[in-house]
Every structure is written in structure tokens, then in C-alpha cells.
Amino acid sequence: MIDGAEVDQAGRRHRIRREDGQWLFEKRAADGWDTLHATLGLPARQVDYEVFHHYTSTHTRSPFTGQLVVMRLAEGVGRKFVGRRLVTEYADGRLETTEITTDRLAGTLRALDVELTSAELSAVHEFYESTKDASLEQL
């Protein structure tokens, strides 16, 4: 990792920098830089990744269980479909948020390049309907 290194990801600026013994991963915002992640920069072992993976894929409080999560990045636009909301973020900082009802689910998934068989789509519809009253953490 190189302190101060910046990259452009489809029109979005990101950087990594070192501050007070931490590595900060940041995204450029209209009014400066927003920190997305931070790490102490300590050595990690395989078991550390296994524990993180187990939590994010199984724990009930993980934002990746109990709700749909699809993210796509294209030139100048990022789309994040989490739970029942589709958030479109443009490189200039504009945000559009849309609640996705069950009747719009299939089209929304297709627009995000998620191709499902009819059996898979049926299962996703059933899951979506069963979770419509749940309030889960958003990403």
C-alpha cells in the first residue's frame, strides 16, 4: 500500500492514506474526503479472514444476510440495491433513491445485470415478500 495513492473507479476518486497508525480508505465527496474503511495495519492471518467471512455470510446482524444486496459500478454511476431500496449515486455526488416494490423486482435485477432462471426468480420473489416488513441495517 502506498500512502496517498489515488485511483479513479468509473469516475469516482478513491485514495488510501496512513494517519495515526491507521490505513484509511476514502472516497471523494463534494465537500472533501469521506472515510469508508479504516484498519490498524496489523498483520492478518488466514483465520482472521475466515472469521470475517463467516460473520458477514451468516450472522443475523450482517447487512449481507436477510436482505437482497446487489452493487454495480459503471462509468460515472454506482448503483446499490440493498433491502428494498435502489440508490443511484452519480460521480458529481447526486443521489437518487427508489423503493423497489415486488412488481418491479425482476426488472430491477435485470437492469443490474442479475440473470435468474424462472425458479430462482420465483424463490427471490417469495423471499422478498417475506421480508417486506423487516428493518435491517442498510449498507
Image: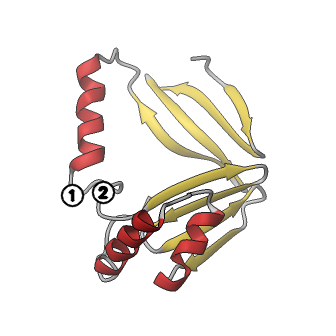
Q: Is residue 102 above or below residue 107?
A: below
Q: Which mark is residue 60?
A: 1
Q: Of residues 47 and 100, which is closer to you in this image?
A: 100
Quadrant (top left/top right/bottom left/bottom right) for the N terminus: top right
Dots 2 and 1: beta carbons under 8 Å?
Answer: yes
The answer to which of marks 2 and 1 sits earlier in the sequence is: 1
Closer to the camera in the image, 25 or 86: 86
Q: Secondary structure at mark 1?
A: loop
Tag 2's secondary structure?
Answer: loop
**Relative to 20, is 90 above or below?**
below
Along the horizontal axis of the image, is 83 left or right of 77? Answer: left
Residue 106 at x, y = what percent? 54, 73
Q: Quadrant of residue 112?
A: bottom right
Residue 18 lies, with reference to residue 24, above or below; the image says: above
Q: Residues within 10 Å of mark 1 (few under 14, many from 20)?
A: few
Name which quarter of the figure residue 115 lies in.
Answer: bottom right
Disc 2 residue type (three-letter)? Thr
Residue depicted at 54% across the width and 35% down the height: 25
75 above or below 43?
Answer: below
Distance between the Cα atoms at labels 2 and 1? 6 Å
Residue picked out by circle 2: 65
| Residue 62 shown left or right of residue 96 in the figure | left
**Which residue does the image show at 51% across and 27% down from the upper left?**
19
Q: Position of residue 107 (x, y in %)?
A: 60, 73
Q: Which mark is residue 106?
A: none
Residue at 47%, 40% in the rendered image: 37
**Three-letter code for the amino acid on which mark 1 is drawn:** Thr
Query: Which residue: 21% across, 51% down?
Result: 59
